[in-house]
Amino acid sequence: MIRIAAIGDVHLSEDTGGRFRPALQTLDEHADALLLAGDLTRHGTVEEAAVVAAEFGSLSVPVVAVLGNHDYHSNRSAEVTEVLAEAGISVLEGQSAIVPIDGRKVGIAGVKGFGGGFAGKCASAFGEPEIKAFVEHTEVAAAKLRGALEAMDCDVRIALTHYSPVSDTLRGEPPEIYPFLGCYQLGEAIDSCETALAIHGHAHYGTEQGFTPGGVRVRNVAHPIIRAAYAIYCID
């Protein structure tokens, strides 16, 4: 049994440190790895990243993360990534991490992702350069996720994103903002190879559970949804 703990959208700042750490001290009793689904900071500053590092770094299980849109706000994502990496947190953006668990190699492919919408109600790369650039960013992110998933030499694949790959987990959010919460291209990437679980955040008012068109379990672990220091998902 592989036990994956996950949480996203903790939005830590310099005055909110210590909120999750007590519950994480015994994490290894309940989980084999912890995934962080982005929006770890409030404004993407290096000072806030240090709070995240103190909160989630040096745990008793491997910690793998992607950044979210909040983590890019101050245009210091590279420095945020460096601070987290120094604390032992693997930050992925089109890369993968292999974690040995229970005699198996668990591969985690991660990317922030982007918006764009879902089948029948999505943006297309047509018209103004700004719209084309928007959709191109979405397609590039999905291609990076697909490449990372397909390239992994592992026994179990997990996809980790900030933006949602399906509309299922957005139920509860205003439909008008679905295109800014995720995109179908991420779901297609997840379905491109055998994936056991997809984790995302970003949708604070959405729903925890959903599935890709190919039947992969998708879980929205935004903190306002799971209302705990982490949620646990098991893979047989």
Image (cartoon, rainbow, N blue to C red):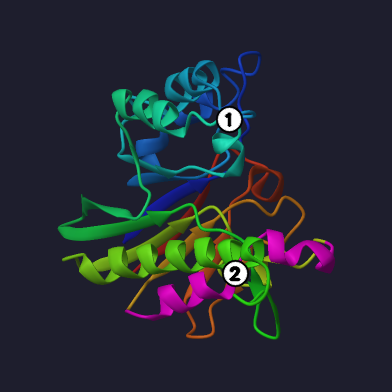
Above or below for 76 versus 190:
above
Answer left or right for 76 relative to 183. left
- In the rendered image, is residue 23 in sight? yes
Location of the N terminus by quadrant is bottom left
Which residue: 40% across, 32% down?
78
Residue 41 - label: 1
Nearer to us in this view, 41 or 33:
41
Say which residue label 2 marks: 183
Give the distance between the C-alpha atoms of the residues marked 2 and 1, in whole angstroms.
Answer: 23 Å
Is residue 129 left or right of 81 when viewed as pictured? right
Please state the extent of the stretch shown in magenta in the rendering. 174-193
Amino acid on which the number 2 mark rests in the picture: Cys
- Please state the horizontal and vertical placement of residue 187, each as a whole percent of the image: 50, 74
Tell me where residue 220 appears, x and y as whole percent.
60, 58
Amino acid type, mark 1: Thr
Q: Nearer the viewer, residue 228 or 143?
A: 143
Residue at 38 percent across and 28 percent down: it is 84
Q: At x 51% / y 19%, what residue is drawn? A: 51
